[in-house]
Amino acid sequence: AQTVTQSQPEMSVQEAETVTLSCTYDTSESDYYLFWYKQPPSRQMILVIRQEAYKQQNATENRFSVNFQKAAKSFSLKISDSQLGDAAMYFCAYRSRLWGAQKLVFGQGTRLTINP
Amino acid sequence: GEEVAQTPKHLVRGEGQKAKLYCAPIKGHSYVFWYQQVLKNEFKFLISFQNENVFDETGMPKERFSAKCLPNSPCSLEIQATKLEDSAVYFCASSQLQGNLHFGNGTRLTVT
């Protein structure tokens, strides 16, 4: 079974600075998806970024980028120019590309605080 | 619709009572998922459906939890004889084949 580990329960960063959230995973599969989701206090789940394992290029979405290291099974999220609105829980997640309704396997989450 | 609709937003039940939660997936999405998020924030997978068929129910506490996705009806998650430990936010999500999961806003269940 796949597992996802986020070893940083909490992180904080000064507004406008850069922060990196860590995520490692374990799988025997070669093809899969990796995601970062943001969950603000409203509890809404917002997709931040998605990476397909077969793609060597790291995904980017505006201020958000990932460092995907397939051999090391590492998938970190970098947030540049942090803004107050980035404060939230961040969840790393894995999804198999096998056929069928493959579930997301979540990490434990990292609570990100932005200091003004 | 274009979003996953979960009802009700909040549900309060006394211990031992039944709770029923509903989820209308995005039209055209074949897969439906239920997750439980407890106060510690961790997501626990409960069950997934492929159309009306159960695909994976490895997370379901079988004695008291049941779920259905019937044609032309919202999906449902039912908890018989609720316990205090069932207090959580229950999320439904839907997706197309290999697409992203789209989450509803959750139902907060409080068992008193």
Image (spheres, rainbow, N blue to C red):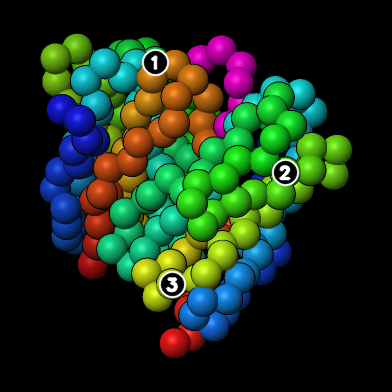
Residue A59: image x %, image y %?
60, 41
Mark toward the viewer: 3 or 2: 3
| Real-space Cα separation, disc 3 to disc 2, in angstroms | 23 Å
Q: Identify the residue at the far right of this view.
A: A71
Contact, mark 3 vs mark 2 (Cβ under 8 Å): no
| Quarter-of-image position of residue B11 | bottom left
In this view of the protein, which residue sits in the foreground, B76 or A94? A94
Q: Find disc 1 in the rendering and name its residue.
A: B50
Question: Which amino acid, mark 3?
Answer: Gln
| Element under disc 1 | strand
At x 37%, y 50%, the residue is A45
Q: Find disc 2 in the rendering and name its residue.
A: A68
Mark toward the viewer: 1 or 2: 2
Residue B18: image x %, image y %?
20, 45
At x 32%, y 48%, the residue is B90
Magenta stretch holds residue A13: no
| Quarter-of-image position of residue B38 | bottom left
